[in-house]
Image (cartoon, rainbow, N blue to C red):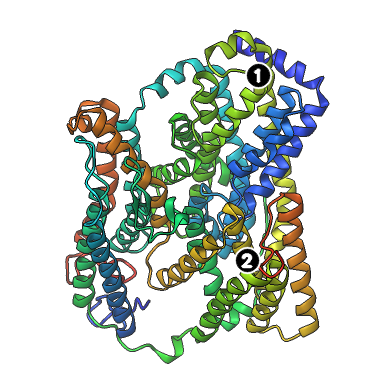
Amino acid sequence: MYELDMLLHGAQALLNQPMALLLALFGVTLGIIIGALPGLTATMGVAILLPFTFGMDPLSGLLMISGVFFGGIYGGSVTAILLKIPGTPAAAATAIDGYELTKKGQAGIALGTATFSSFLGGTASVFVLIFLAPVLARFALEFSASESFALAVFGLSIIASISGVSVIKGLISGFLGLLLATVGLDPMGGFPRYTGGYTELFNVPFIPVMIGLFAAAEAFKSLEDPQVRAGMAAALDRIIPPWHIFRRQLGNIARSSGLGIVIGMIPGAGADIAAFVAYNEAKRFSKTPENYGKGELGAVAACESGANGCTGGALLTMLTLGIPGDAVTAVMLGALTLQGLQPGPLLFKDHADLVFTLFAGMLVCYVFMLVVGLGSLRFMGRILQMPKSVLTPCILALCIVGTYAINNSMFDIWIMLAAGVVGYFMQKWDFPASPVVLALIMGPMAEANFRRALSLSNGSYDFLYTRPITAALLSIAIVTLLLPLLRRLWAQRSAGGPSTINPAAGTSRMGTPE
Amino acid sequence: MSNAPAPGGKVGLRPQDRLATLVIAALVMAVAVAAIIVAGDFPPTMLETDVGPARFPIIFAVALLVLCAILVFNTLRAPAAPPDDPAQVGPKISYGTVAIGIVATAVCLYAMEFVGYAIATPIYLFGLMWLMGRRNLIANAAIAAVLTALIYAAFAYALSVPLPVGSLFE
């Protein structure tokens, strides 16, 4: 088999380049640190390191950048699980159940599961990249504006399943997020909407809102209770998940990795979308979907394997077609061309040795990620030994600095603070924050691609049902949106009708009116 | 929020939770109405095949109005929860501390624009630690200084991300 032979040759060549391996290790470590810090994303990490690769040989430079990419996607999960600070947008999905596990005293197992799932998802995606790149690249070309719109709608339909105790409140959060997502320049005409004259609002300040809703809101909450203020955060406990527990997640990880790879290939869709979609599918296939949102290990495994599965998928279209799957690979595309390499089918022909050595290096990067990740978790877990009265101010300071780091803008920090205050009140009255973040990710994608598809079809709405992928994704979206509602109605009926439940139709199990 | 079962096995709402839900719904409805009014001033699109910049915000705002109306309806119909059992009441929540924390964060941000990160942050950290019950002033000052320096080193030196210097020192 040609690919396997080339991969073995690549691995052999890699062993003769210790400097490239060292730089890969450095990249992974830096990526994990960058990913863990709020506001700093994998994209930013790759962009920061890009100038340093100019003087390097192509393999060393590209491996270091790949290391930052992989480490950055994984690193976001560490603070998401320990502190409910999603270091990266992809980790917002991990934070939902990851932090609940920390509150239950299972932070160690959650972190260990996240690390192994990231490793498995990422490694699987690199293998797919190696063996199936040309075949899958053709599938990626099938995705035009209408399919991307349908994917965004499918992503948005997840809102119903991450709504927590009340679907109506989840939907209100989601639509509020969608309305917020329209702030900025109109995607077709460039007209500024709801910006109030502030140029800072020309792009939706999505990361400041995310940091505010998750991290700052949680920090404000820990100010309110004197007992919490005086206590420790939680214990780390065991890190490596027991085999009998992790074994049950393997199917979930395989499915989520597959989803991540496919989503990663689609231009414009990244690890954040993959993590949320993987979360939803894990919940759909789970035997205990009611545990999702309350600290379910399967949710952490799904989000992390999905997000890291995205890495290989995003690289696949970038390397085979020259189309970056997300923002990180767009920067990596620049790194590739700076090294004199032209992405596309000819890359695999003209530079096969380099490409397969790079693939072997990517697999090594994931091994480094596993080793560095597991090795650093005990140290990271020390965070939980800090008294809350020190940890909370530290979290707030990190929120401020991390938000500032995105655009060097004080305006963004004020947005973060406002989102933190709103998030605090949302938390208090059971309005979930995750749908807002999901809507901020998917909203602009849905609107821009819908309007683009409409223009491409000369104003006809036929594209909604004549294109098979679009129709299939929209159908799944409708089912996904309606299923939780139907399940609840069914549960209410089978529970004995209105006499045993709240007459406010749809009042949830926890008593929150829906 | 209260999840106490009302008499007859029904799930009820405490008066304060009912009021809060109604206030939040009213606020969201006000935002949605404002969004629709402002969207009315958006210019029409130049492309015949496009729906224009106002269509999506209006759809989202109308959906919000409908959902909030359902929430209000359900909240008003929900039965009242029985009074809390004093024995089962949890720790008293100090909203004052939260408010002070939020105001302190706002003051820190305002100060940071003038005096920069290096001065505003340690004072902010010190104040928050005191607010959270740490009364050892020397230890608090030392922790605040170390944390400020660590964050500064991580961002400014290790990652080359500049932090606010403050207009007084620029």
Q: Are marks 2 and 1 in contact (CB under 8 Å)?
A: no
Discs 2 and 1 share one subunit: yes
Residue A241 shows up from this direction: no
Q: Residue at x 76, y 21 (%)?
A: A14
SS class, disc 1: loop
Q: Provide the residue designation for mark 2.
A: A395
Question: Is the residue A246 above or below the residue B40 in the image?
Answer: above
| Point 38% across, 76% down: residue | B1
Q: Where is residue A184 in the image (x, y as percent from the top left)?
A: 39, 52
Q: What is the quadrant of the C terminus of chain A in the image?
A: bottom left
The quarter of the image holding the N terminus of chain A is: top right
Relative image position of residue A235 (x, y in whole percent): 66, 64
Q: Which chain letter matches label 1?
A: A
Residue A144 locus on image (x, y percent): 34, 28
What is the distance, in whole Å, between disc 2 and disc 1 at their CAs? 43 Å
Q: Tag 1: residue type? A: Gly
In this view, the residue farthest toward the bottom is B86
Q: Which of A238 and A52 is in front in this view?
A: A52
Q: Earlier in the sequence, mark 2 or mark 1?
A: 1
Amino acid of disc 2: Ile
* Residue closer to the observer: A38 or B82: A38
Is residue A233 toward the left or the right of residue A22 in the image?
left
Q: Dot 1 corresponds to which residue? A: A340
The spot of residue A267 in percent (x, y) is: 44, 31
Q: In this view, does A431 lie to the left or right of A412?
A: left
Using the image, determine if residue A89 lies above or below residue A131.
below
Tell me, yes or no, if residue A363 can be seen here: yes
